[in-house]
Image (cartoon, helix red, strand yellow):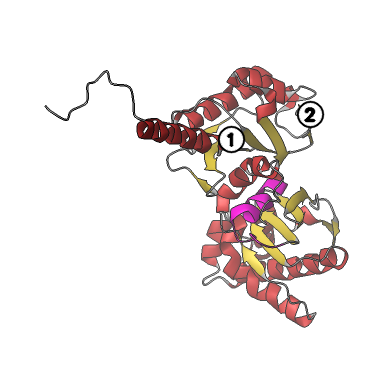
Amino acid sequence: MLFASSRDDPPTKTQRAQRSNLNSFSVFMKSSIVAGVDIGGSHITAALINLTDRKILPGSQRRDTVNANGTAGEIVGGWASVIRDCFASHQLQSGRTGIAMPGPFDYNEGISLIKDQGKYRSLYGLNVKELLAEALNTDKADITFTNDAACFLQGELFSGVAKGYNTVFGITLGTGFGSAFAKEGRAVDADLWCMPFKNGIAEDYFSHGALVARYASVSGRHVSNVKELAELAETDEVAKEVFTELGINLGDLFLSVLRSTPAELIVIGGNISKAFNRFYPALKAVFQYHGLDIPVRVTQLGEHASLVGAASEWHNRKGTAIGR
């Protein structure tokens, strides 16, 4: 063949440039991929997040149960297995990892301070960051820990409903009551679960157990969860009233908190937020009565918010405020 090049011919200048560009692009893509991890009381969820387009990589999410009362080796080993599998879903070695972790916890050093909460007792006083880095065969500098409540709001700031806002107040309504404040694109745990509220503390009114118990005390009937309660609210007047009370109580809580810490936006997450349309009218009425004009939005990212928020810690470390 007259014009064919020999297989042994050296690459042309154009070919070398193309290969260099491909290699550079590959390195760039890998450097923008971070594992976001959410540690729960009985489970771990992980997914790969592309910090460039701020999205979860398809097919990368992994979830598994964890024996929170197991040995330190069993717990950390279980976490490491899920994280490794998450990276392997896209043929990657374990790398930069951001973890949403419940407290109390020394987030800078990576030391667990969880002691009397019925979970992770065996990790108390241990440097979990070092243990996990060893299990993953990576550097401990590649692992960050962030408060789980702050991660929820961080995720919404990074690529969710709060993106572009400066001051934001976020809460999660689920098995417990989580809260976080954000200023200049940076979320921190507000730790309001134990704030005095009415005849108790906030968590007595804003949690799965609180709503189920309230319905039982008024109706004399039992429901298994808030989803069932929301379905009953179609026709059950007591169920409707439970959600109305929730909206009024949230309105009162927000009024109290926002007097000292103003916000441009309120974001609500957690499983109970799926019943937003049940309690929002009462919440809105409280705001209108007091002349408060602050938008209230439901989480856009849902259960992915904490994963994205944990991973976005690496974006913030580049010097860019999250969500701005």
Mark number displayed over residue 112: none
Q: Residue furthest left?
A: 1
The amino acid type, in three-letter code, at marker 1 is His
How far across and how far down the image is residue 232, in percent? 53, 65
The amino acid type, in three-letter code, at marker 2 is Glu
Task: Decide whether residue 156 is among the magenta residues.
Answer: yes
Residue 21 placement: quadrant: top left
Query: For the N terminus, which image quadrant?
Result: top left
Most foreground residue, 64 or 183 = 183
Q: Is residue 201 above or below residue 111?
A: below
Most foreground residue, 162 or 297 = 162
Residue tagged 1: 43
Residue stretch rendered in magenta on the structure: 149-165
Asked if residue 46 can be seen in this view, the reply is: yes
Callout 1: few (<14), some (14-19), or many (20+) C-alpha neighbours within 10 Å? some
> Distance from label 2 to label 1 (Cα)?
23 Å
